[in-house]
Image (cartoon, helix red, strand yellow):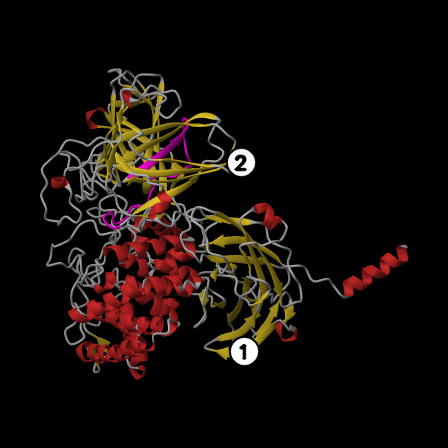
Amino acid sequence: MSKLLYFLGLFFAAFPVLAQPRVSALRCEYRVNPLGVESLSPALAWKINAEGRNVKQTAYQVLVADDAAVLAKHVGNIWDSGKVSSSQSVQLPYKGKTLQSGRTYYWKVKIWDNKGNASAWSEQANWQMGLLSKADWKNAKWIAYEKMPDSLVSILPLDTRKDKPLAANVLPLLRKEFKVAKAVKSATLYLSGLGHFELHCNGAKVEDHFLDPGWTKYDKEALYVTFDLTNKLNRGANVLGVMLGNGFYYVPPIKGRYKKLRSSFGYPKMICRLAISYIDGSKEDIVSDEGWKTAASPITFSSIYGGEDYDARLEQKGWDKPGFYDKHWKKALPVAGPSLSAQKAEPVKLFDQFKPRSIRSVTGGEWVYDLGQNASGIIELWVKGKKGDTIRISPAELLTEDGTVNQKPTGSPTYFQYILKGEGTETWRPRFMYTGFRYLQVKGGVPEGAPNLQSKALLIHLSAFHVRNAAATAGSFKSSSDLFNKTNELVNWGIKSNMVSVFTDCPHREKLGWLEQLHLMGSSVRYNYDAAPLFKKALQDMRNSQTEEGLVPEISPEYVKFEYGNGMFRDSPEWGSSSILLPWYLYEWYGETQALTENYDMMQHYISYLGTKAKNNILSQGLGDWYDLGPKHPGVSQLTPMGVTGTAIYYYDLKIMAKIAEMLGKAADAAKYRQLAVEVRRSFNDAFFNKATMQYASGSQTANAMAVYMQLVEPEYKDAVVARLVKDIRTTNNSLTAGDIGYRYVLRVLEEEGRSDVIFDMNSRSDVPGYGYQLAQGATALTESWAALPTVSNNHFMLGHIMEWFYSGLAGIRQEPGSVAFNHIRIYPEPVGDLHSVSGNYGSPYGMISSSWKKTAQGFELSVAVPPNAHASVYLPATESSVITEGGSDIKGQADIKTLGFEKGRRILEIGSGHYKFNVQAH
């Protein structure tokens, strides 16, 4: 027997059994087990885990059932795709029976690979449909505490509008008590509360969401959120409780509180349906109507800009529990409300907690807390004192010279106020307002342990929680450069602080969705976060904000009509073009085709609008290269003449539109856009190109870079224009001058033209305005201006374009031309400057891609991971005579590594999935 086992061991060692692939990370519409799906053909996706190399899916089978027990028997009674010969594992459209409103569907996947192996069935996943028609709300009504008079409704106020101060509106509580007499099989709540809501059930807050639902163009739609309450209902009496806040739905014009704008869609209101299915097969619906009761909450003031006030003396204990005496509450008032769509992006949640690094007394007996990090957030206060003691907390990014908080750049006065009830240690967090800050100035209290001669309230604890969209982290970057690592964090805080239910410009002064960020900073965001649903939500906001003329305004949702500067803050092609570029980028990064079809009308309408604004094909309206680095205070483009950036974007739009039209089978449209692009290109070069100097317009970094990137420059002049760009940078001591619009294209052109050494030199310094300079000034988040000016925002989303280069350039994780969703990866690391190591990871739709390199005494070492169902071209820095090994063996003898040639100092290799470790040694 022992001899038999021995020989069997030798046999299997000589002929190893190939490992079975595994299917994991099932997603529906990008999310894990999502609720509120509204697509009748939702997109399904999965990832493959497999040992070995060059693993590809050759076939799949998807089963969908309406009962988990049925699916467990490997039966798809709703859809059985059968075995389909295909490598598709992302964006697979559901093709089964018609999906029903509110139903939950269970699904799993099995795949076959190119090694002849079949996987086991994946673990079950599920999705639940949303409410697909108005009838599905079962006659639920919008209800409120009070109705806003028509005279106060202002859907799109002008930025010049002056408001009369009003008293604070009532922020209501609403409750509904009901009985459950039977065993519950499932209970799903569909709820929208405007501007924001907090849901309670039987005395406890439901879920850890913050600022639900996401803000929208409320005259067009509101979002509802779906909650599973199956395990939260009790046999007998139950209570649903809802608190409502204003958000952007209503910005109250209160004297003495900051407001950027006055949106006034109505007073807070809510609508809901609780769908209960019992084990015996019966069903019941609890809906919002006049049977609900309402009263004022302890929140006495709430403004998305001005802060929030809470009077703990007004608390009604047990209001959200069964048995509460609500006879003094009034009946809810039925009111009108907007149409409803499901919230499909991740919710906003609380993340990092920041505790004070220092606490200092300042004039007037007040105290300033330094939390160490400038971030979007809310406070958490623990305080002990007498009934009626009042704590006022003023947040700010910066301090004045005397050490007090400086709100001038971010909007003043903004503060949080808490009035004590006088019952031991009291804890409070604001519910419906967040802002951006690092410092907190406290009035009315004294830190525990400090002298307290006036017997003020004791501040037991004061901290902050970071607030952001809960999109999962997708990537990571690290290098041997401390400056680059800190720059990466600087930009990341700018992203995180402005990623809520809208990609905002800043988390304090405006909180508005300025659109240029979506296409310019989109790649940086995507390398770091799984935020596709949030980008799709931004497209929905654009559709809702587009005017009848076709204009996509610079902010979306549009809450204010900017007329200052002859409309320059409303109509800039570089901003509105996100309506065209973003759907295309979603296709390139995720294989997202639905965004192309559902936004095509918006794109067409906008490109036609631009045509009506063009003069001889030149677009000169708007802001141009916003916040470029010129001799004056930053603002409208200084170094690049108006018309350059707008027309370059217009040309790029037309090229992208032609590609999209071709993909969608609209050949006539594609031909029309291609022809117009030819005309725009000719006009652009006639207007701006100087053949004598080989530069565009003023020769600014932005003008030359955009002409090259958009392929406006004729091929025979391209190298000369790139040389002019490099010369401009070198002759200004490697300083940057491009602004919000141009800097991304400066980086893209330099990287694509093999000049990452120039990017390195531009961004490896702290003595001139740029990232290093911001860090040297003490910035902890990306600032609005290159010079970290204290007069503007010090936590801003724009200008962080270098993060894209960290991943695509230094780590070298890119896509080959024509690749979709990173199915064909390009690994092209840039070992520039004095860097001796870099590592980057990106969780692509197919799985984790990693590239990690270091310089060694012998040469260069690169470790690469390629996910199954994808392949990569690796461009190794080498000479033609270099000796290249992988895993210690010469690559020439390895069948799973193909050598494709030598080009521009790079040995090009083709590899499939798996892990590889390459060494390059000079010979």
**Picture quadrant of residue 810:** bottom left
Q: Look at mark 2 in the image and give the residue it sits on.
A: 279
Query: How far from the left and from the top, in percent, is residue 85?
Result: 58, 68
- Identified at 39% across, 53% down, the residue is 533
Q: Tell me which secondary structure the magenta stretch mostly adopts.
A: loop
Check disc 2 and give the amino acid type. Answer: Ile
**Picture quadrant of residue 77:** bottom right
Query: How far from the left and from the top, in percent, is residue 723?
Result: 30, 76
Residue 902 in the figure: left or right of residue 708: right
Q: Look at mark 1 in the image and give the residue it sits on.
A: 900
Secondary element at tag 2: loop
Indicate whether 610 appears above or below 156. Answer: below
Check disc 1 and give the amino acid type. Answer: Leu
Secondary element at tag 1: strand
As for residue 208 lying within the magenta part, the answer is yes
Mark 1 residue crowding within 10 angstroms, few (<14) / some (14–19) / many (20+): few
- Identified at 62% across, 71% down, the residue is 896
Residue 922 shows in the view: yes
Between circles 1 and 2, the one closer to the viewer is 2
Indicate whether 665 appears above or below 848. Answer: below
Q: Using the image as rendered, state which of residue 377 and residue 856 is in the foreground.
A: 377
As for residue 438 lying within the magenta part, the answer is no
Residue 830 shows in the view: no
Magenta-drawn segment = 196-220
Indicate whether 679 appears above or below 589. Answer: below
Which quadrant holds the C terminus?
A: bottom right
Q: Using the image as rendered, state which of residue 168 and residue 813 is in the foreground.
A: 168
Query: How far from the left and from the top, in percent, is residue 227?
Result: 42, 40
Which quadrant holds the N terminus?
A: bottom right
Residue 533 in the figure: left or right of residue 848: left
